[in-house]
Image (tube, grey):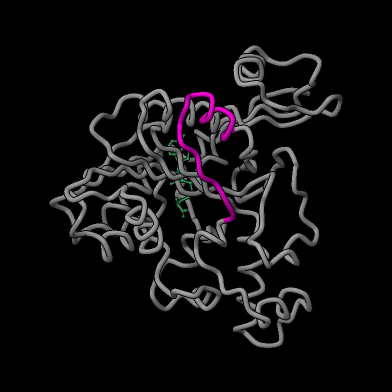
Amino acid sequence: MTSIHRTDDYHRNGAIDLFTEYTVCESLARAGSPSLGALTVRKPYGALVGAFLDGRGLLPPGCRICEIGGGYGSLMRGLLEEHGTRVGHVVMADLSRYLLKRQRRALGPWSDRTSFLCGDAVELVSALSGIHCFILNEMMGDLETWTNVDPGRLPPEVDRFVRQYGLEIPEKEPFHFNLGALSLVEALCRRGVSALLTEHASDPVVPRGMEYLWEGLTPDGYPREIRLTGHSEFTIRFSHLVRVARAWGRTVETGSLLDFLGVENTPKMRFVFRMRAVSSDEWEILYEFLDHAREYRWLLVRPA
Ligand SMILES: C[S@@+](CC[C@H](N)C(=O)[O-])C[C@H]1O[C@@H](n2cnc3c(N)ncnc32)[C@H](O)[C@@H]1O
């Protein structure tokens, strides 16, 4: 039956354990993280995100950045450790007071330049001003999702998005629809700000030269449920987000998170993945990292 799926209660009230979710950010959070062995440049996730933003002119001196859904604060800690001299102020915003406390602890060394806000992502994007760039890492899958939608009887909010942006939907099969993620991208476009978004994709892409990673993946799928401790999240159909951002005249770039992170494209990686080679701890970690991260995409939306 068609219904709307929300995780607000879980995030507002739970003592959230991100290690049960295996976020890509946490698996690459620290200089010694074993999964960093998969990357050409073995720096923590936040440092790589900072380098990417800096390379596109999105960390001008004194910039104000806002991360929404920052979990344990690891991304921002890595970014500030490597690029902190460029950053004027950071706003960390989250629905979870428990995680905001953890973020405050993680960012203790930068307490003079950080502030913390509790609230919902879509509302915060609409309310905050003076931000150069938003970062929304692996959080869109937690936002509202319409489930088991009948293509012949779209709920009014879904119908509005499908018509306004010409979104493709299945002809007959029931499908899940990322209402929250689309509302978020629409709010970012309306504000005319830059934003980097990453998430588990229902329509993944893989790095060129690593086509073996397609094995068992669906290239053009619709969102699927991922059951986690205490809640579920949904993969994101990036082609829908891209359509919304383009309709607003924004500059859009997107790709595989493995490319974004600079994963090593070597015969060893191919061997480990193809042979499911888990004969040592190192290879098991590499295999698990590749198998998990290959479904992730990034999206950068900027004013034209
Ligand atoms: C899966 S965790 C990802 C954490 C971190 N970004 C990472 O990659 O490890 C999702 C994060 O989004 C937050 N979150 C979930 N729903 C939210 C909402 N509606 N508004 C703001 N934050 C939300 C959670 O509390 C948590 O910090």
Q: Quadrant of residue 76?
A: bottom left
Q: Residue at x 75, y 27 (%)?
A: 169
Instruction: Out of 242 and 104, give the one closest to the viewer.
Output: 242
Instruction: Out of 304 and 121, give the one closest to the viewer.
Output: 304
Instruction: Answer left or right for 148 relative to 119.
Output: right
Q: Residue at x 31, y 25 (%)?
A: 127
Residue 190 in the image: above or below residue 72: above
Residue 155 magenta: no
Which residue lies most toward the right here?
172
From the top left corner, tell me how far across and down residue 210 is, in percent. Answer: 69, 67
The quadrant of the picture occupied by the N terminus is top right
Specify the segment rendered in magenta. Answer: 241-256
Instruction: Out of 301 and 151, give the one closest to the viewer.
Output: 301
From the top left corner, tell me how far across and down residue 303 is, in percent. Answer: 38, 33
Q: Quadrant of residue 43?
A: bottom left
From the top left corner, tell me how far across and down residue 47 is, in percent. Answer: 36, 64
Q: Residue at x 59, y 46 (%)?
A: 230
Which residue lies most toward the front here?
304
Residue 61 in the image: above or below residue 261: above
Residue 36 in the image: above or below residue 215: below
Q: Residue at x 61, y 74 (%)?
A: 265
The quadrant of the picture occupied by the C terminus is top left
Which residue lies most toward the bottom here?
280
